[in-house]
Image (cartoon, rainbow, N blue to C red):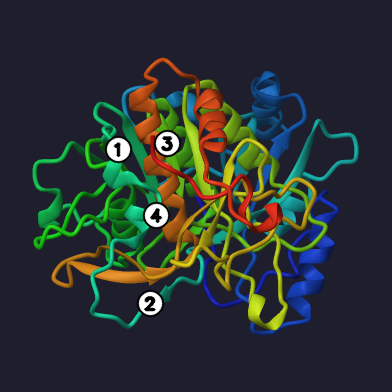
Amino acid sequence: MKPPFLGKRVFWDHPASDSSSSEMYREAAASDLEVTPFYTGRHLLILRNGKREVVKTTRLLETKWGLTVANTADFITETMCESRIKDADVLFYNELGIALVAVDDDSMELLHPVDADYTVEPEKVVYIPDDVTVDTAVESSWGIKAVRAHESVYTGEGVKLAVLDTGFDVRHPDFKGRNLTTFSFVPDETAEDLHGHGTHCIGIACGSSDQQGVRYGVAPGVQIYAGKVLNNGGRGAQAWILDGMTWAANNGCRVLSMSLGSKVLPGQSYDIAYERAARFALSKGTLIVAAAGNDSRRSTNLFSPVSSPADCPSILAVGAVDSALQVADFSNRAINQEGLVDLAAPGVAIYSSWPMPSRYRTLSGTSMATPHVAGIAALLCEKFPDAAPAEIGRELLRSAGSLPLPTEDVGAGISLAP
């Protein structure tokens, strides 16, 4: 399968999609030569009638256009990843009614008939939000105290919690003896975290304490599922995120945390592919939380919409607050109709694990806020073992601590542990 382009070039000249938002994408890219790429050069074919049309469309792709089609249903005893379908032109996500199409532009043009039973969207490049390294030697656990995780009688024992990110440092001494499952969806890269972001986020959601006894993790008793969906440079293809979402759901993870995303423009709707994956996860018992994004600069009166995929209706979007419980300068706002901020959590100067030999680092970002909420969701799953994801979500919102701040910035308020 043709690999995604994640590099420096901006794809504003690729074939147009059926989405009304694609013109906005091209205009934004053309107006700013410094912008990072929006698209990978591949496409997502979204069936209007979902998975009911998979067989019919597969035959069409194979017989009319001579494409080689793989299907996630072909992978029963092993996890699907792009490394295992190198000869395919198309991958159908059987559960979602979506296909990843990786062909040249001329072939892609043929897949745009006006009477098609599907729409075509460009595959997005996905990034780690622009997190900020904090220059401090102070090992602060203010976030743990703010969400009251240190007071909870729950640890997330028996709950599977997945984090999709840059992988994990499995040799980190603070996680010795933990129940840990890793998998890389990034072709030609192991699940080892050579970036650091994934290890930091997993530490917040699933870690415990450092060697001095400073607690930095919310749910130290969970079973950890670390899915690498972003490469060692912190970039990934949208299909890799879909891979990880279905993997977490199919493995029985009760909670899925995603501190990643793509920038969203004012007026742009949520991504249908992500929403279908989120609904599939909910149907399998998985609650998803995602970072609202760090594109705002509130101090200069710049406010950006909630990022994708956090703007999906079936995903809880998390904004960031600082130790004074004020909205972080970078935290995105609910500007678009569907892209709401659901909850807020500590996201400024957050201390957590980092790949060895550094061992720890302090960062700021909605990336740090999100795993706080994921960890609290895991505590609730332990407290309510038979609760459906929607019930856990409602309990998260109900139990949040109110803040004297606009709901478009913090949603229901700061997430609190049970």
Q: Which of the marked residues, 1 or 3, is nearer the chain's N terminus?
A: 1
Seen in the image, is 7 located left or right of residue 138? right
Dot 1: within a 10 Å radius of its alpha carbon, few (fewer than 14), some, or many (20 or more) residues? some
Where does the image place residue 282, in percent across and percent down from the top left? 54, 26
Where does the image place residue 226, in percent across and percent down from the top left? 31, 45
Q: Amino acid at mark 2?
A: Thr
Please say if the residues under marks 3 and 4 sit with CB atoms less than 8 Å apart. Answer: no
Kindly indicate the quadrant of the structure image that contains residue 180.
top left
Label 1 to label 2, Cα distance in Å? 29 Å
Q: Which mark is residue 152?
A: 1
Single out the residue that lies furthest toward the right. 114
Residue under label 4, please give it: 146
Residue under label 2, please give it: 133
Which numbered disc, 1 or 2, marks the residue closer to the eye? Answer: 1
Of helix, strand and loop, which one carries label 3? Answer: helix
Label 2 to label 3, Cα distance in Å? 26 Å
Of helix, strand and loop, which one carries label 2? Answer: strand
Q: Which of the marked residues, 1 or 2, is nearer the chain's N terminus?
A: 2
Residue under label 3, please give it: 377
Depicted 128 relative to depicted 276: above or below: below
Q: Which of the marked residues, 1 or 4, is nearer the chain's N terminus?
A: 4
Q: Which residue corresponds to the image point at 38% horizontal and 46% vertical from the top-left?
A: 163
Q: Amino acid at mark 4?
A: Ala
Label 4 to label 2, Cα distance in Å? 21 Å
Of helix, strand and loop, which one carries label 4? Answer: helix
Q: Which residue corresponds to the image point at 65% horizontal and 23% vertical from the top-left?
A: 51
Q: Which mark is residue 330?
A: none
Q: Which of the marked residues, 4 or 2, is nearer the chain's N terminus?
A: 2
Q: Amino acid at mark 3?
A: Ala
